[in-house]
Image (cartoon, helix red, strand yellow):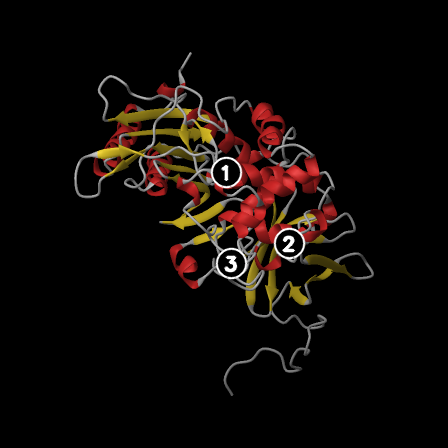
Amino acid sequence: MTSPQEELLPGTRRALLHRIAVAQREGRAPSLVAAVMRDGRAVWSGARTSVEGEVPDGDVQYRIGSITKTFTAVLVLRLRDEGLLDLADPLEKHLPGTGVGEVTVVDLLAHRAGLAAETPGPWWERTPGSLRPGLADVLGERPLVHPVGRRFHYSNPGYALLGALVEKLRGAPWADVLRREVLDPLGLHRTTVEPVAPHAGGWAVHPWADVMQPEPLENLGVMAPAGQLWSTTGDLARFAAFLAVGDERVLSAESVREMRTPAAPAEAADVADGYAYGLGLELRHQQGRAFVGHTGSLPGFLACLTMSLADDVGAVVLANCTSGPAPFTVAADLVRIVAEAEPRVPAPWRPLRKADSAVLDLVGQWYWGTYAFGLRLSADGLLALEPLSGKGRRSRFRPDGDGGWVGLEGYYAGEVLQPVRRPDGTVSHLDLGSFVFTRQPYEEGAPLPGGVDAEGWRGLP
């Protein structure tokens, strides 16, 4: 039987090892571990360390910082799917008395609530959570620094509020709910709130000298839902597989797809950087490749989990230093190495088992004004509308059960494509959100807004 490590070609494995070796050396990380996932499981892992003879493996815990937020978001989406809340609900409906009750659940998930980025008082990541025993202590006297819902502004206290919301509606501590509802069902037994041996120690490396000192390892208290967790490359590889396709025991494929959809107004700088935020997940665009996942950091640790769904390749990178290697850059490079060296082999083309003649009447070439489009029926039963020029609005459509088709993405997401038939049953035209598509450009007799010139097409006089 082929082991996971042998599934990649030797040249690919060497390129992956070289990349993390460069990252560990140039980033001056005491240790760095990584894993690559494909087809829903880990296919490569590697590690580099400054301690001879003690190379960490996929079972060694590192602190994962804000990747914790993705776990918290999963718990909130579960509450929504069970009907215990609506994402549009104001926080006050479920968690009264916070002083920011007008913000909604989705505002908090997407970092658009206008809350401050950090807590007041001493640096919360490096001091005991006992200094902030309640929500008032993490919000402070001026919790809102921007208008609610107007802009993306990353907020750690916002996820403390979401953790408190989970506790209120479940009647149990956040950590217990997480273990029962997410970690145990997914088999993430090495993901814990407190470190469990074997685990790495967190280090600060001097910026101007090759020396280091240990960072304090604090329990974050009510801020735990924003960044408390410890995990391993093995567990995070399994969690990445869940975020790609869902698991009905935890969260449906539709709900994890919702998490991966941009939900926050992007700042101009974020647009330029190819960055967006969904519901507990970061979305990045780099060198023509779309990534989804989350980064994390706490004093002594850096972390990244990211995936290219189009390539079906993901990567996890963990390091035990406060600064140094750029975890997303390294993880994205690991994905690129595998995707380019060993591209995904597509599944065989197979035809539809059954084709509806009424649907076949719709396929082919259509015109919106003078713009040419092709409408194709695919083996998954969806219609795909694409501009024949290669540039312009495109979308897939699913049947709505009433003879129409609902757009799934892009400009036409949620819009209905409605075939309009003549008395004899033949298709006259398509109506898509008031846009009329005809078989010929400005077809004579078609119900085109503004009509068609009586003299028709002609050359220069």
Can the viewer see residue 214 in this picture? yes
Q: Secondary structure at mark 2?
A: loop
Residue 388: assigned label = 3
Which is in the foreground here, disc 2 or disc 1?
1
- Disc 1 target residue: 130
The reply, left or right, for residue 17 in relation to residue 58 is left
Separation of disc 2 and disc 1 at Cα? 27 Å
Around disc 1, counting alpha carbons within 10 Å, would you say few (fewer than 14), some (14 to 19), or many (20 or more)? few
Residue 104: assigned label = 2
* Nearer the observer, 146 or 130: 130
Tell me whether the residue at label 2 lies in contact with that at label 3, contact meaning CB atoms closer than 8 angstroms: no
Placement of 145 over or under 263, stated as above or below: below
Query: Outermost residue toward the bottom?
Result: 461
N-term mark: 2 or 3: 2
Around disc 3, counting alpha carbons within 10 Å, would you say few (fewer than 14), some (14 to 19), or many (20 or more)? some
At label 3, which amino acid type do we have? Answer: Leu
Coordinates of residue 106 in the picture (x, y in percent): 61, 51
The reply, left or right, for residue 6 in relation to residue 361 is left
* Nearer the observer, 215 or 398: 215
At label 2, which amino acid type do we have? Answer: Thr
Query: Outermost residue toward the front?
Result: 131
Coordinates of residue 111 in the picture (x, y in percent): 53, 52
| Residue shown at the point (66%, 49%) measured from the top left | 87
Q: Secondary structure at mark 1?
A: helix
Coordinates of residue 117 in the picture (x, y in percent): 47, 53
